[in-house]
Image (cartoon, rainbow, N blue to C red):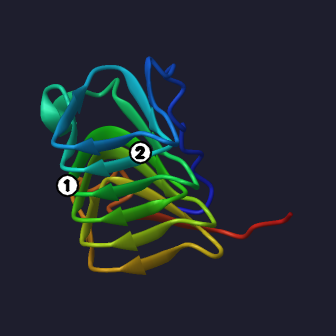
Amino acid sequence: MFGLKRNKPQSTIDSLIGVTTVIEGNVVFSGGLRIDGTVRGNVVAAGGTAETNSTLVVSEKAHVEGEIRAAHVVINGGVEGPIFVSEFLELQPKARVRGDVHYKALEIHLGATLDGKLEHSGALGADGQRGNLKLAANNT
């Protein structure tokens, strides 16, 4: 399990929600979305978590109040609500998550906080292990 190298999402960001923007309502996106502002509603990739090319980035200054569903998610801001990630979730050092997290592969950096349950949603790997959980130390 420790020798495995996980591919992080390499998708481009197609859309941006700016730092001074507040959205009241659900956001449905395709491709890549970066949130620097506030969203009070669900943030869902078109096709839900089934779309393997979707990437969501919640930046350090961003805040989401609602459900998140995407294939690849990187969080360094605040999220209040459940998170469903079909491929890879990264919680960076300033991530503040309050809600249950459903993931296939997960990386948590030192400093990230999570108030909720972690639920692995992937099948058994080739080595018979159930989850891919990686704890990362911040070397800065």
Helix, strand or loop for disc 2? strand
Q: With respect to residue 74, does 51 lie above or below?
A: above
Residue at position x 31%, y 48% from top?
Answer: 39
The answer to which of 19 and 2 lies nearer the viewer is 19
Camera-nearest label, 2 or 1: 1
Disc 2 versus disc 1: distance between alpha carbons?
12 Å
Q: Residue at x 57, y 51 (%)?
A: 4
Residue 129 in sight from this viewpoint: no
Instruction: Report the residue that reaches farthest toward the right.
Output: 140
- The amino acid type, in three-letter code, at marker 2 is Val
Q: What percent of the width, then of the height, locates residue 103? A: 30, 57
Q: Is residue 18 above or below residue 40?
A: above
In the image: residue 16, left or right of residue 138? left
Quick one: 137 or 76, which is closer to the camera?
Answer: 76
- Asked if residue 114 lies left or right of residue 100, the reply is right
State the residue at coordinates (63%, 66%): 93
Which quadrant of the view contains residue 31? top left
Tell me the SS state at disc 1. loop
Residue 4, visible in the rendered structure: yes
Q: Which residue is mark 2?
A: 73
Q: Which residue is mark 1?
A: 67
Binning the other alpha carbons within 10 Å of mark 2 as few (below 14), some (14 to 19) or many (20 upward) gives: many
Type of the residue with mark 1? Glu
Locate residue 81, reporting x and y percent: 23, 65
Percent of width and height locating residue 42: 18, 47
Closer to us: 36 or 119? 36
Q: Position of residue 9 (x, y in %)?
A: 50, 33
Q: Quadrant of residue 25?
A: top left
Which residue corresponds to the image point at 26% horizontal and 79% vertical from the top-left? Answer: 117
